[in-house]
Amino acid sequence: MKTFRPKALFINLAAILLFSLAAVPAFAGDPQARFELLDDPGRWFRNTAGEIDGTESLAVVSPGTKIDFGGHSNTVHTITSLVFPTGAEGMPFDTDKTSGSGSVELVTSGLYVFFCKIHPFMFAAVIVDDAQTEGLDLGDSITLTNGVSVPTSSDLATRLLRTFFIATNPANWQDHTSSKPWRITYPDVDVRITGGAVVNLPAVLNQRYGNDLPLAPGIKPAIPGIGEVWVDTEFELTAGKDKPGTATQVDAKTWEVTRKVSLPEINMNNPHNMWTDRDQKVIYQTEWFDSKLTVFDRETGKLIRRISIGDAPAHVMTRPDTDQVYVTLNGSDSNRSVVELSPGAVSIEDKIDIGATHPHAHWISHDGQKLVTPNVFSDNSSIVDLQRNAISAIVPTGSHPLATGMMPDGSKYYVANLADSTVTVIDVTTGSVVKTIDLLANYSPINGDIRGPVGGLPIQTPVSPDGRFVVTANTLTATITIIDTRTDTIVAMLPGDPGTHGVQFGAKQGGGYYAYVTSKFSNSLIIVDPDPNGDGNAADAAIAGRVNLVASSVTASDDRVTGHAGMGGQGVLAIPVVYNGWVQNLPAYWADQLTAGQRNPLSR
C-alpha cells in the first residue's frame, strides 16, 4: 500500500479500488479505468472514477490495466500518446481515426499522458504503479510524441507535469482579478523517478518553479490602440448554455471590456478563432468542438447565421481580393479540408484540396493567390494556388505543425511546430525550407538552464503587418518570443501567462503595431509593443499593458457569466484588420484612423 499525504489513495491489485484524495470512491470493479471525452473546460478527458486533488483527468492503476476512452463531445478527437515510459510495451498509442474512442492496455510501470492531436490541450494522465515499490512509479525516463526521451528527473519532464496539473484543474488557472498570489495545487504524493529515487512531487515542482507567485497587475498601455480587440474566451461559462465559450470585445482606446457574446440561443460551443469581413461589420466565429461556423454582428453581438461546415472547424480568414471565407476543418480525414464560403458565409462554394488532412491555423497571401496550411497529422505544410485551385507544394515541417504566419509581400511564411518547439521558414515560390528555428536552443531539458530566449510548445505565430517581426505564443514555457525576419533569429523573449496561445497584430495610435497575446489558463490579455522606439529593432520589445478579460459594469452581454470568468483566451482578432492586402480594403471610417505607414505597411 502507498500513501498520499495528507489523504489516501489505495490500489488493491485484486479489485483495484481507486479513491480520490477527497476520500470519494473513484473506481471499483474490473481491472480497467475509463476516461470520457467531453467539451467541458479542464476535464476534457474525465476519469469516470472521480477527482484526484482537483483534477478529473488522472488515474492511478496497476500494470496490465485496460484504459477505455469514449465520450460525449460534439466533435471528433484522437487518443494519442504524448508521453510514455521509454520502451513501454505497446507504445506509442494512437487511434487511427478521429473517433474519440478506443482502448489500450498499459503493462509497463510509469507515467503515461494522452492528448488529442486536434485539441492538444486535452490531457489524460495515467500512472501505472507497481505496488511493490516505494512511491508512485513515474519510470526512469519518458519518451515524448516527437521521439525525444528524457529522464523523469529532468526539467522538461517536470515542466510537462506542471502543465498537466495547471491545464486539468481550473482552480490552478491564473485569475488576474484576485488580490492573492497565484497558488498551484499538486497532489501531495511521493513519486519514484530516475534511478529509483523517491521524491515528493509538490516539493520538487515548488522548488523548481515556485508557488504563491505574485500576479502581474492590470496596466493600461500609455498609448491607445485603434479600434477593438476580440478574444475568444473559450472556457468561460454562462447561464444559458451547457457548452463553454464567449467572444469578448475590448475597446483598444479605453481598454475596457465592452461586450460578451455567448449566443445562448445556439449553445455556441468552444469558440476558437475569428476573422471579419471587408467592411469590418461581422465576426466569423469557428466552433472548434463542433461542426459549425457562426456569424454575428460586430456592433450588436446579434446572431446572423450559423452554418454546418464539417468536423472541428479551427481557424477562419477571408481572401483579401474576393472577401470569400476560408475555414480549416481540423477534424477532417479528407484532403478536401479547407472550406471555401461565399462572402458573409452565406453558403459553401467549394472544399479545397490541400493534399493532406487535419489543417489548423492557415494563412492567405496579401493578393489572395496563395493559401498555406499546417497539416497536424502529417507533419507538413501545403501551399495552394487559389487562382488555379491547385497544390503548389507540400513541404515537410517539424512535429505537429499548428499555425502559420506569412510575410506581407508573400515571399515566405512561418510554421510553428508544437511538439518539437521549432519554427519552419518556407519560401512560398519554391516550396523549399529556408531555415528551421529551434525555439529551445537556449534551454537545457535536463537541468532547466536557460541561456537566452526560449519557447516551448509554440502556437500562433503571425508576422507583423510591416514584415519586420514574428511574434510567437509558447504554451509550455509561458513565453512570448520575437523573431527578426531579416535574420530569422530570435531576438527577444517576454513573459506570458500559463497556456500562452494566441497572437494577432493591431494598429497602435500614431503609428506602429501592438501584438495582442492571449492565454488559455489566464484571464488576462497581454499587449506587446515589439518596437517601442520605432527603430526596427525588437531588442527593446516590451509588455505595454495587461487587460483583465472579465466583464464589468460597462460590459454588454447576452448571457450571465457563471464560471471561469475571462478564461480560455485563444483566438484573437484586432479590428480593423491591418495586414497588407486587407488594410487597403478598409472603409474610410477605419482607414482614416490609421497613419500613412499603417495604410501602406510595405512603404518603408
Image (cartoon, helix red, strand yellow):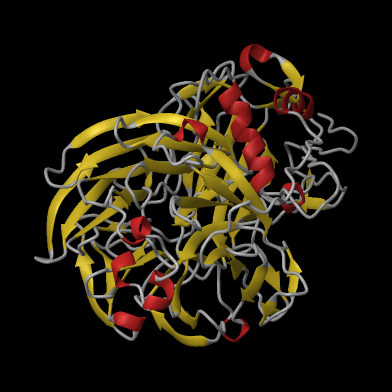
Viewer-nearest residue: 235 or 407: 407
Please give the name of the residue rendered at 29% of the width and 67% of the height, measured from the top-left corner. 584
x then y, percent, for residue 457? 48, 38
When asked about the image quadrant of residue 537, the answer is top left
When asked about the image quadrant of residue 390, the answer is bottom left
Viewer-nearest residue: 117 or 492: 492
Viewer-nearest residue: 163 or 176: 176
Locate the N terminus by quadrant. top right
Please give the name of the residue rendered at 30% of the width and 58% of the height, measured from the top-left corner. 600
Residue closest to the far left: 388
Up-down relation of residue 274 to residue 265 (above or below): above
Residue 375 seen anywhere in this rendered image of the structure? no
When asked about the image quadrant of residue 550, the answer is bottom right
x then y, percent, for residue 462? 39, 49
Viewer-nearest residue: 224 or 285: 224
Q: Is residue 257 left or right of residue 150?
A: right
Please give the name of the residue rendered at 61% of the width and 77% of the height, measured from the top-left corner. 262
x then y, percent, for residue 115? 51, 47
Q: Is residue 319 left or right of residue 393?
A: right
x then y, percent, for residue 232? 55, 64
